[in-house]
């Protein structure tokens, strides 16, 4: 139990140091966070993000439609009624 606590504590400290390093330590002229922003703000990256968003909206619409069909199935078709037999006059 105590070992798990220390393991989580060490993992938390390592995560905190990694986050601080990502945002504060320069790699070349910029920090890693600034490099990521520069990469993802290029026109091709914005185009790709727009295309992914469009596809995601289309897929979610199709999935929602299919789920609605499963939740609310159409009523079963009615069987046609047989015509009533006409009474024949006695011969």
Image (cartoon, rainbow, N blue to C red):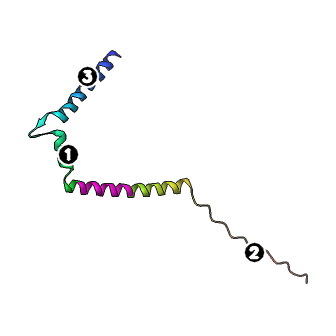
Is 75 positioned to the left or the right of 33 in the image? Answer: right
Can you give x and y, in whole percent of width and height, for residue 3 in the image? 31, 17
Say above or below: 1 vs 64.
Answer: above
- Location of residue 14 (image quadrant): top left
Q: Residue at x 24, y 24 (%)?
A: 13
Dividing the picture into quadrants, the one containing residue 73 is bottom right
Work out which quarter of the rendered image holds the N terminus and state it: top left
Cα separation, mark 1 vs mark 2, equals 75 Å
Residue indicated by mark 3: 10
Quarter that holds the C terminus: bottom right
Q: How far apart are the two marked residues, 1 and 3, measured between alpha carbons?
A: 29 Å
Question: Which x, y percent locates residue 40?
Answer: 21, 49
Q: Earlier in the sequence, mark 1 or mark 2?
A: 1
Q: Are marks 3 and 2 in contact (CB under 8 Å)?
A: no
For the point 19% across and 44% down, the residue is 36
Residue for badge 1: 37
Q: Which residues are magenta?
A: 46-57
Q: Which circle marks residue 59 in the picture?
A: none
Instruction: Residue at the far left: name it.
Output: 28
Q: Residue at the location (43% across, 57% down)?
A: 61
Comes first in the chain, label 3 or label 2 = 3
Residue furthest top as drawn: 2
Numbered disc in front, either 1 or 2: 1
| Residue for badge 2 | 83
């Amino acid at each position: 139990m105590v070992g798990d606590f220390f393991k989580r504590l060490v993992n938390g400290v390592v995560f905190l140091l990694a986050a601080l390093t990502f945002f504060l330590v320069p790699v070349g002229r910029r920090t890693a966070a600034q490099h990521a922003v520069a990469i993802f703000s290029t026109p091709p990256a914005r185009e790709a993000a727009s295309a992914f968003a469009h596809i995601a909206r289309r897929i979610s619409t199709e999935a929602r439609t299919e789920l609605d069909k499963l939740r609310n199935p159409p009523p079963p078709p009615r069987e046609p009624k047989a015509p009533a037999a006409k009474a024949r006059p006695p011969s």
